[in-house]
Image (tube, helix red, strand yellow):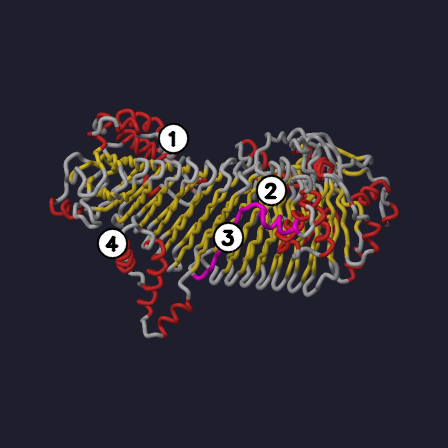
Amino acid sequence: MPETLEDLAEREYEHGFVTEIETERIPKGLSEEIVRIISSKKDEPEWLLEWRLKALARFQQMLARGQHPSWAQVSYPEIDFQDMYYYAAPKPKKQLESLDEVDPELLATYDKLGIPLAEQKRLAGVAVDAVFDSVSVATTYKEELAKQGILFGSFSDAVKQHPELVRKYLGSVVPYSDNFFAALNSAVFSDGSFAYIPAGVRCPMELSTYFRINAQETGQFERTLIVAEEGSYVSYLEGCTAPMRDENQLHAAVVELVALDDAEIKYSTVQNWYPGDKNGKGGIYNFVTKRGACRGRRSKISWTQVETGSAITWKYPSCLLQGDESVGEFYSVALTNNMQQADTGTKMIHLGKNTKSTIISKGISAGRGQQSYRGLVRIGPRAEGARNYSQCDSLLLGDRCGAHTFPYLEVKNASSTVEHEATTSKIGEDQLFYCRQRGLSEEDAISMIVNGFCKEVLRELPMEFAVEAQKLLDISLEGSVG
Amino acid sequence: MSRILEEARDRFLALAGEAPPAGGLALLREVGLEAFAEQGLPDTKQEEWRYTRLTPLAEIAWTNAPAAIGVKQSSLEAAAEPVFGCEPVVFVDGRHRAGLPGGAGAGEVAALAESAEAPALLGTLAEARSHPFVGLNGALCQDGARVTLRGEAPCLVHLVFAEATEAAASHPRVLIEAAPGSRGTVIVDHVSLEETTHLANAVLEVEVGANASLDLVVLQRQGKRSFHAGHVAGRVERDGRLRTHTLTLGGAFVRNDLVVTLVGEGAECAMKGLYLGTGEELIDNHTWIDHSVPQCRSDELYKGVLAGRSQGVFRGRVVVRPDAQKTEAQQSNPNLLLSDDAEIDSKPQLEIYADDVKCSHGSAIGRLDPEALFYLRSRGIDVDEARALLTRGFAGEVLAALPEPTLAEAVGALFSERLERAGESP
């Protein structure tokens, strides 16, 4: 593979292609009317429309008051929320019953992404609910899951088929008034995934969605809700890519997880949205609210994320540790190259007794990338014996990048133990020398060191994802060193 | 800004109108007044004040400290006792009263209000607009000291800022200049002469010249009802060394800001801090080390002991500027919670814009190790004494770095006494 460094540096975004399929869009802009159109297109019940409208009112109030969040260590031009499409769906030609009926061009898109549905179907163990610009076009393995009583499908279907569940849990972890982008999402969310694991069921396969933003100037506002009943277990994978566009696209998703007694949810993300070109033109604004509530005793929620894409990432997957002895985990690798900016981290809110949380965050900054770890660990006054361990390491490649750490530790209980450690350094000359002395090229040596640096996080990922994540890291970093 | 904070700002502005003129300090006052009028008192929506509510301070109707000394001669003499090995220079309610010129071995100390050129030097390191309390200090400053260290013989200067008058607010300003190649220790000692509610809002500007070495000890041992805001702005030139020791032993409200900029290659800064909160005290330490040039080192250790219903806040910022390669920066903030009602909010923070650096920070929060307690008890030491030993041991690491052993002993004894008096064990 005799590619020169220059070739690698010039390498363009691999997943940058536009699928030419007819999309159905509603006019630009944000208003009550738009929200009503979205809601009616999806045949939503009255209560959901009302909820959306309340969220819209809240969002418009925050917008009017200038409450656009500005505390993150990122900079971008002001977003014009009226100059955006809030809904785009591939035009339905007819009802789809099997994969064979899916638009072949759409399937080809997934082929290029390396996760062909057709192949996935044959690959045992992964059920994909592919979200293509807001509408879930195909869901695999639904029947097999249904046998175990597991509900997994698009959010819109869930609203129709299981309104009582959606109504019970929607907004219970991330209320529509939670923050600026959550309010926007609650008003205009178009689709997303819904998973419900009944009591005592261990989900036999990894559930997976694949998000992709295709149409120009649309924001993708998906909403994911996962409920794990008593004693159940589920592992959920989420991957994201977006084609190349010059304008910045907004992605404001909300993910809510609920774990009841003894339940465990493992949520893994590989985020590879288009990061913009090397001059910072274009790219995705990824402003996401993710939160899980460990409601039950001994429940566990584990977030694992590999963030290599997006022009701007603003994302803090959090755990509310309400149940006694519940456990929250956060494993993250974030990579910023060229002009990318990332402000990411987690919140661990300890409320129950003997709750535990672990935070492992690895940041890699190259080119002119800027990234920050921002995390909150809060031990409430009643969280007897709570325990937290946080470790945040940053690796700097290049003299124009930056890495920042902003941990907040708030402790109101003396019986708790909280530890936070962070380091920042570059790859040691001696490490590089050692590898090169043994015949590795500089590129390979750096790739190996970076992979080693991220190992603690990557090993938390399910196998298929770990391979993809490692590949992504290599691709994203190539050309940034030397 | 809430109504209470606004009213407090207006009262302070009115006080500036009433304050007697202070000769050479007129310019400082003018700039400070303008800056403070603009900024006012911050509320908790501001990141720097997120955990620190100023309402208790704003609710008090502060007055300008009286010109006449309202304290007994005996307590004044007690304050002027040479406890740390040199004659102290004493300021009461922010004005110079006794002890000038400095005692044996001291550098030059001049009272600011009587100094001709010193006022012109003020406000360059601690800019009025950089912090609301710096603006306030400038607006109401009556007096202060200029300390100059020269020559290679180590010098020791002890400044005592004693507060006495009920509801009085004093705003002393200190300028410390360590000339190139000089060595010395400056102790800035904040005490209460009477158990009154008073506010000491001190601003220290510290210039460490090339190759100079300065130990700055800020000892805050005011009474239980006292309010304290202390701002230290330092600059360290090439190969200079600044070691700060911020020892906070209590007060109803204490806010310390320490900002050090390393401007010459090879400069070093060590920040040590110890804070003890008892009762319902609030102790807030904000530090900021700015590495603006290559090849500098910084090392920070702030330890907190929080008992009763006290609240501790720590925010340590380390900034490494784009060209500051080969920087080494360490920061650590361990905290000991001695009671279930105590609270600590810790926010260590690294901002790094250069790549060839070694930086780390850590923060830990916990209680006394039950195994260590058991070990001591199994050897016949009763539980209160064991707790006292362990707590004192925890604090010892910071005290051991003090330049004078007598100082470490005195502060250690004071630390244990305060903890004991608060009714906490030890």
* Label annotation for residue B129: 1
Q: Which residues are magenta?
A: A415-437
Chain under callout 1 = B
In the rendered view, tell whether residue A269 sits above or below residue A325: above
Where does residue A116 sit, x and y in percent of width and height?
81, 48
Chain under callout 2 = A
Marks 4/3 same chain: no
Q: Nearer the viewer, residue B20 or A31?
A: B20
Among numbered discs 4 and 1, the one appearing first in the sequence: 1
Amino acid, disc 2: Leu
What residue does disc 4 label?
Answer: B406
What residue does disc 2 label?
Answer: A397
Amino acid, disc 4: Thr
> What's the CA distance linking mark 3 and mark 1?
33 Å
Where does residue B110 sit, x and y in percent of width and height?
21, 34
> What's the CA distance linking mark 2 and mark 3?
21 Å
Chain under callout 3 = A
For the residue labelled by badge 2, is the local secondary structure a helix, a strand or a loop?
strand
